[in-house]
Image (cartoon, helix red, strand yellow):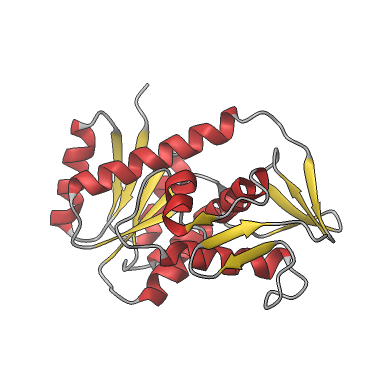
Amino acid sequence: MSRTILVVEDEPTVLETLAYNLEQDGYRVVTATDGRVGIQRFREESPDLVILDLMLPEISGTEVCRIIRQESAVPILMLTAKDSEIDKVVGLELGADDYVTKPFGLRELQARIHALFRRSEARLTVPAPPVVDLGPVQVDLAGHRLLRDGESLPVRPKAFELLAFLIRHPGQVFNREQLLEHVWGYAYAGETRTVDVHVHSLRNLVEDDPAEPRYLHTVRGVGYVFRRPS
């Protein structure tokens, strides 16, 4: 059975182009032209991946992203015509797994879709590891969740994958390009700011003092490393 992709996009030309090319790639495509219908289609169709425009009528793309993420861990790829870094950060903070800035090449989009599916499949096949204690926070690698006093903490799927990867390689320093390749599944073209955003988010969740981290350390001029306090 072919995978289903929901495309929520209000620009007719972009929507038609995406739908046609995704169908040519063998996907079943469901479409919506505003946020309200997008949420309805999502609930009706249970797609395997969502391509979501940031600027939508009725309900904004960021709000649609927030609602979907509350209900599902489905991969979300956001489209944005804006160059502002804050728009990309907001999308990631709300739970999007990746973003593409318009105008974009179809081959780039295809590569990102394939990478999201690879990461999603990998999560389903990873053997159940133990829970890792980080002070008052527990990292349930098998359950893909963070816990504090038995209560789940809100964490973006990609941020959790980044934390899990670093935990599985303690003491090993990774630069941003390596983290993008290992966690996101492919190399970004100069978009290494994404890693910094996710690390910042994780520190706010697991560190007692994010400004003086105990676990997620920055190696100046190189990248990041997970270390347990001595």
Vertical placement of residue 173 versus 80, above or below: above
Q: Quadrant of residue 210?
A: bottom right
Vertical placement of residue 114 versus 220, above or below: above
Q: Between residues 7 and 153, which one lies in front from this camera angle?
A: 153
| Total number of numbered discs in the rendering | 0
User: Residue furthest toward the top?
Assistant: 1
Q: Between residues 71 and 134, which one lies in front from this camera angle?
A: 134
Q: Between residues 112 and 227, which one lies in front from this camera angle?
A: 227
Image spot of residue 31 (x, y percent): 29, 47
Q: Is residue 46 left or right of residue 145?
A: left
Q: Between residues 207 and 25, which one lies in front from this camera angle?
A: 207
Image spot of residue 222 (x, y percent): 49, 63
Vertical placement of residue 201 versus 143, above or below: below
Q: Residue at x 57, y 64 (%)?
A: 199
Instruction: Name the image quarter holding the C terminus.
Output: bottom right
Q: Is residue 128 left or right of residue 137?
A: left
Image spot of residue 227 (x, y percent): 71, 57
Q: Residue at x 32, y 62 (%)?
A: 190
Whether residue 94 is visible, yes or no, is: no
Instruction: Name the image quarter holding the N terminus.
Output: top left
Q: Is residue 215 left or right of residue 50?
A: right
Image spot of residue 173 (x, y percent): 57, 55
Q: Quadrant of residue 143?
A: top right
Q: Residue at x 77, y 56 (%)?
A: 228
Whether residue 201 is visible, yes or no, is: yes
Q: Residue at x 18, y 32 (%)?
A: 24
